Amino acid sequence: MAGKHVVVIGAGVIGLCAAEAMLRRGFRVTILERDAEPGNGCSYGNGGIVVPSHFVPLAAPGMMAMGIKMMANRRSPFGFDRPWNLEALDWTVRFMRASNQAHVARSAPLLRDLNLASRAIYEELVVGMAPEVGYEERGLLMLCQTAKALDAEARLAEDANKLGLKAVVLDGQGVAAVEPNVWMEVAGGVHFLDDAHLTPATFMREMRGRILAAGGEIRDGLAGDDFRTADNHIQAAGGVEADEFVLATGAWSGQVARKLGLRLPMLAGKGYGLTVANPPETPSLPAILVEARIAVTPMTDGVRFVGTMELGPPGLRQNPARVEGIRSSIPRYYPNFTPGSLEKSPVWTGLRPCSPDGLPYIGRPKRYRNLIVATGHAMMGMSLGPISGKLVAELAANDTPSIALNLLSPDRYA
Ligand SMILES: Cc1cc2nc3c(=O)[nH]c(=O)nc-3n(C[C@H](O)[C@H](O)[C@H](O)COP(=O)(O)OP(=O)(O)OC[C@H]3O[C@@H](n4cnc5c(N)ncnc54)[C@H](O)[C@@H]3O)c2cc1C
């Protein structure tokens, strides 16, 4: 088993965590990354929040109705980019079918377990990394301006408590006591105490260094989507032969899987980020501005605001109206962040890999004996990177996965 050669396609957080976990088990690992100069993709510019609080999948009751309402507003945090194509329509139908209470009830314990296991691996991974990775376990504040949003968050906190997660409902004063150094215009919030945060780009750089130091090979600028196959066996990807292949190509995974004759419904969930390098004030823990659907994270290089979910085919074209929507929402919660201070920050764009039921695809598709799929983590890929890497390594070693993978099967839409 050890010494087996594994090719990992895609050097995002999922690919790097899988590579690192497999190297620790003694495999030979080669990573193929299409970008010649990676460093700006989804795994680098995201909100950096590790989210046990996110135990409700994207496909949940009420999401469709909320999405339709938001679509009417060009500046809203949700919309479709080119919705009138078969792929988007097919995805939407599947999303609607999955958005029910039974799906949420089935998924919540699994998402909790995956997130808590991932956080535990983060605690080990960051040991010996540069302090600029900034990994901290201070929880997450859900900040609400309206009583309606606060009620909904309080109900979520109750569900979290039932799942064994720590969540405390706070009024305005309670929020100010948790975050005393920042001026916030909020009615209250919920403090989810199990969450953590880090500065993703620094973590990614440290992981690349660790992989190289452990003898792994990273081939940037080499796409791994021209496959040589024989029967139910992949022989080579991007011209590189191996015993085993891991498909971790993020939002492009649907397209790459199609080349293997696999059906992996996937849309890119485009989001934007602004990092204020010299902020007027720095929160001590991350927050989500609930009505505006913006996440705020104190990072080692500034305060980062991320938001928007614009579903469509992978593509980085920016939508100025949605960026403006983010910029104009922030001062309503944090009056000290003036529009001027936000306009100076360059806008980053990233693509979340979104499956229709809001759950990742992790597992071995039946069609191939030597392929492992690890993708579709949507808005929690940074959080779930380490556990996904561990699960991939377990599958590659033909061990029983430490967390049951039946809900995550890459064959569930085959
Ligand atoms: C605005 C925003 C905020 C977010 N905030 C958070 C957060 O706070 N917490 C959290 O947990 N998650 C967050 N996420 C989600 C998280 O960033 C993603 O889920 C995660 O980065 C996906 O990782 P990945 O490795 O699957 O994909 P990617 O990071 O996209 O990596 C895939 C890689 O595959 C490469 N590739 C594609 N095709 C090929 C090919 N044919 N051959 C070789 N390489 C290929 C790509 O170039 C890319 O480098 C956020 C996302 C966005 C957009």
Image (spheres, rainbow, N blue to C red):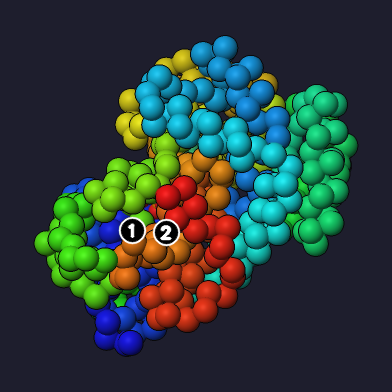
The reply to whether residue 301 is in sight is no
Q: Is residue 329 left or right of residue 224?
A: right
Q: Earlier in the sequence, mark 2 or mark 1?
A: 1
Label ID, residue 40? none
| 236 lies above or below 357 | below
Crowding near pointer 1: few (<14 within 10 Å), some, many (20+)?
many
Which residue is painted at 70% across and 30% down in the image? 62
Q: Are marks 2 and 1 in contact (CB under 8 Å)?
A: yes
Residue nearer the viewer, 70 or 39: 70
| 57 lies above or below 349 | below
Label ID, residue 374? 2
Residue nearer the viewer, 367 or 153: 367
Secondary element under disc 1, as helix, strand or loop, is strand
Q: Position of residue 218 (x, y in %)?
A: 23, 64
Q: Position of residue 93 (x, y in %)?
A: 53, 31
Which residue in the protein does label 1 denote? 247
| 203 lies above or below 22 | above
Q: Is residue 390 left or right of residue 335?
A: left
The reply to whether residue 398 is in sight is yes
Q: In this view, which residue lies farthest toward the front?
A: 231
Q: Quadrant of residue 363?
A: bottom left
Crowding near pointer 2: few (<14 within 10 Å), some, many (20+)?
many
Residue nearer the viewer, 311 or 138: 311
Secondary element under disc 2, as helix, strand or loop, is strand
Residue nearer the viewer, 91 or 272: 91
Which residue is painted at 41% across and 36% down in the image? 268
Q: Is mark 2 within 8 Å of ligand 1?
A: yes
Which residue is painted at 40% across and 81% down in the image? 397
Q: Position of residue 338 (x, y in %)?
A: 58, 21
Q: Is residue 170 left or right of residue 120?
A: right
Q: Amino acid at mark 1?
A: Leu
Which residue is painted at 63% across and 17% down in the image? 69
